[in-house]
Amino acid sequence: MNVVVMFGGKSTEHEVSVITGVQVLQNIDKEKFEVVPIYVAKDGAWYTSPRFSDITTFKNLEEIPNFAEEVTPLFSAGKLKLLIKQKGFLAKEKELPVNVFFLCFHGGLGESGGFQGLFELSEIPYVGSGILGSALGMDKAVAKKVFEAEKIQSAPFKEIFFEEWEKDKEKILKEAEKWFRLPIFVKPARAGSSIGVTKVKEFSDLENAVDLAFAFDEKILVEEGVTEAREVNVSVMGNAGHELKVSECEEVFHETDFLSYSDKYEKKEGQSQGMVSTKRVIPAEISREIKNKIQELAKRVFENLGCAGLARVDFLYKEKTGEIFVIEINTIPGSMAFYRWEKSGISFPELTSELIDLAVKRQAEKKKHTTVFASNILKNFKPSLKTQKTG
């Protein structure tokens, strides 16, 4: 089975995606699968090279076109073909057969449903959530509306579009003091890795925080902070509508006011290992009752957003009140959340194999349902006079 591992992409989380992609390449079971890496550059070009399983290859991104072979996606007659342009004077194009795409994108079209739509059209199985689950998971504001409808508690919030901010900035800043209690979190609605996120402790700082968030998205989320809370995360695996597995809970810690990009990915010695770099305790030191509640809530979030494959769901837990707030869902978690599953008895190679199996099963189920009719109702269609005149 040919498994194409894709990562990179036109995203602010490009480098983080590269780390996850390389981690998957290094841990996927080579005895079960023929693995081909495809790196999507920041300009959108696709490349492949056996050197992509080494993270040091990506220290100089501008050098990649000099040694890697370019991959051209060709969509024709409902099928997706990948053509590899080989290096050399007499080199020819060769077709790359694909059985499964393993998506390791973070942010951008790779996580929001764009690439998923391409693979749906071509009917090729892919690891991860479909178009709807990906889009909902990426849009924090819409996801929170789903949580509200399903009575899953999350922090009070407002979504603001760039156009209304430009027109009514002063009005919004005044109203914010009525909407929320400090602190406030301001974040792009459709970004990740804490990029563009600000914790606002004084209303006088709100304007700058909003401007920063709008640098990354045309829609932002302004959210009331949940104080005196512990951040507890959990990973869910499976396909919505089927039995779901849930990992051990973890508690994550941060050195700044919130779990920033630096806390997540940057080590003091300058060598990141992706989300593995984050300070955490697994299993989280919480009661069995709270653990069970968080795990069940995570499955509800996963199910209600129609997710598939793997996701991470982040929560805030207030010990004093026993309240649990969902922060967000991440449909392609950093490092594929393998460290949580290792603590749950599933190794990284076993995890990748299970995710590939879930993708194949989901595609097989889709084929059981009718998507087109054999009959053609247009045969007997009689155009009206109005239609004839218009034509």
Image (cartoon, helix red, strand yellow):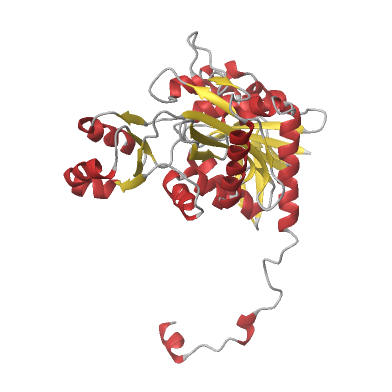
Toward the right, the furthest residue is: 31
Number of marks: 0
Residue 94 makes an appearance in the image = yes
In this view, 263 is above or below 370: above
Q: In which quadrant of the rendered image does the N terminus lie?
A: top right
Toward the bottom, the furthest residue is: 385
Location of residue 66 by image quarter: top right
Toward the top, the furthest residue is: 269
- The structure residue drawn at horizontal position 29% and vertical position 46%, both measured from the top left corner, is 162
Q: Is residue 159 left or right of residue 16?
A: left
What is the x, y in percent for residue 97? 73, 42
- The structure residue drawn at horizontal position 62% and vertical position 29%, both measured from the top left corner, is 337
Q: Is residue 210 left or right of residue 295?
A: left
Front-most of residues 96 and 270: 270
In this view, 154 is above or below 91: below
What is the x, y in percent for residue 218? 34, 44
Q: In which quadrant of the rendered image does the C terminus lie?
A: bottom left
Front-most of residues 200 and 391: 200
Front-most of residues 235 and 378: 235
- The structure residue drawn at horizontal position 25% and vertical position 42%, both measured from the top left corner, is 176
In this view, 377 is above or below 163: below
- The structure residue drawn at horizontal position 31% and vertical position 32%, both measured from the top left corner, is 183
Q: Is residue 364 left or right of residue 227?
A: right
What is the x, y in percent for residue 242? 71, 50
Residue 69 makes an appearance in the image = no
